[in-house]
Amino acid sequence: MRSLAKDNGMKTHFDSLKCLLLLSIFTLGGWSGTSIADKVTLDSGGHKLKGTLCRPGGTGPFPAVVYHHGGGGNAIGGSPEDTCRALAKAGFIGLSLIRRSTKPLQGHLEDAEVAVDYIKQRDEVDSGRIGVIGFSRGGLLAWQQAARRNDLAALVIMGVAVNRQLNFADAGNIAAPVLLLVSKNDTGSRYTKGRNTLKFTRRVADALKQAGRDIEFIVYPSFRNDGHTLFFEVRSEYWKDVTRFLKSHL
């Protein structure tokens, strides 16, 4: 998974690039206006969480999507900033918040809740059209979040983390339509500690179907040497399905 840069020189270089990107206003192909990316800092239980808020051009109100990244500790799984910008390009307000840098899950659901609560109260957001995307550990958090909230209109779970804290019985509590994505060869690697994400995702899909939920389940062809890495970047292989699903429900 992508990890935070530890080399001071490299970190300074990356921070400079990020500042330039966050201060810029750029035109996005396929969108008639401009898009703005801003830094945000949110408080979650005393933890100051940094993130990126991306907005399409115009006044809105817009549907909004919160992205929950994977990883734990200082490792960031997925591509939070690129996903945020891709969401704005597709016409959504995007928010990618970096959770507290702890490996245990304790407090991470609260961080996810802070992100959704923040996006809902923004003036340019249509609070009735809120979606969540979660990858790996972020997918687990998205599941837990959707089971306890009734204000989410769409849920996308990609390469969900294999974890006993995902309660299959919660499927009946999830009101939002669900898009489940996984790669055929996401069957165990160093990124998943050898756990079979494909098999686990099938169990998640079965639980949702048995609960009578609105679910779409896609298994993509094998991706390179490790299917989990399919979602490390915004890739056309799956992103077209994500935007199609979100636009149909938000």
Image: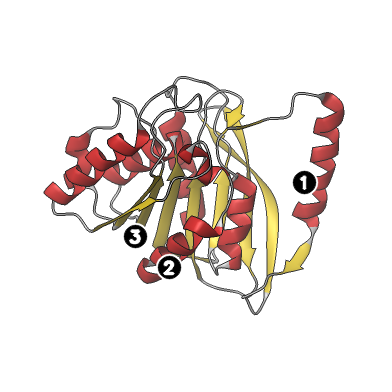
Nearest-to-viewer mark from 2 and 3: 2
Sequence order check, earlier mark of 3 and 1: 1
> What residue is disc 3 on?
153
Sequence order check, earlier mark of 2 and 3: 3
The quadrant in which the C terminus is found is bottom left
**Of helix, strand and loop, which one carries label 3?**
loop
The answer to whether residue 79 is left or right of residue 183 is right
The answer to whether residue 191 is left or right of residue 249 is right
Sequence order check, earlier mark of 2 and 1: 1
Query: In the image, what residue type sits under mark 3?
Result: Ala
Q: CA distance from mark 2 to mark 3?
A: 14 Å
The answer to whether residue 9 is left or right of residue 94 is right
Q: CA distance from mark 3 to mark 1?
A: 31 Å
Query: In the image, what residue type sits under mark 1?
Result: Lys
Could you say where residue 229 lies in the image, as x and y percent from the top left?
53, 40
Question: Front-most of 185 and 96?
Answer: 185
Question: Front-most of 63 and 136?
Answer: 136
Could you say where residue 119 lies in the image, as x and y percent from the top left?
50, 54
The residue shown at (22%, 58%) is 214
Q: Residues within 10 Å of mark 2 (few under 14, many from 20)?
A: few
Question: Front-most of 244 and 103?
Answer: 244
In contact (CB < 8 Å): disc 2 and disc 1: no
> What residue is disc 1 on?
18
Could you say where residue 7 lies in the image, as x and y percent from the top left?
80, 24
> What residue is disc 2 on?
244
The residue shown at (55%, 28%) is 100
Q: CA distance from mark 2 to mark 1?
A: 29 Å
Q: Which mark is residue 237?
A: none
**Of helix, strand and loop, which one carries label 2?**
helix
Query: In the image, what residue type sits under mark 2?
Result: Arg
Query: Is any part of residue 121 visible from this angle?
Result: no
Question: Front-most of 210 and 62?
Answer: 210
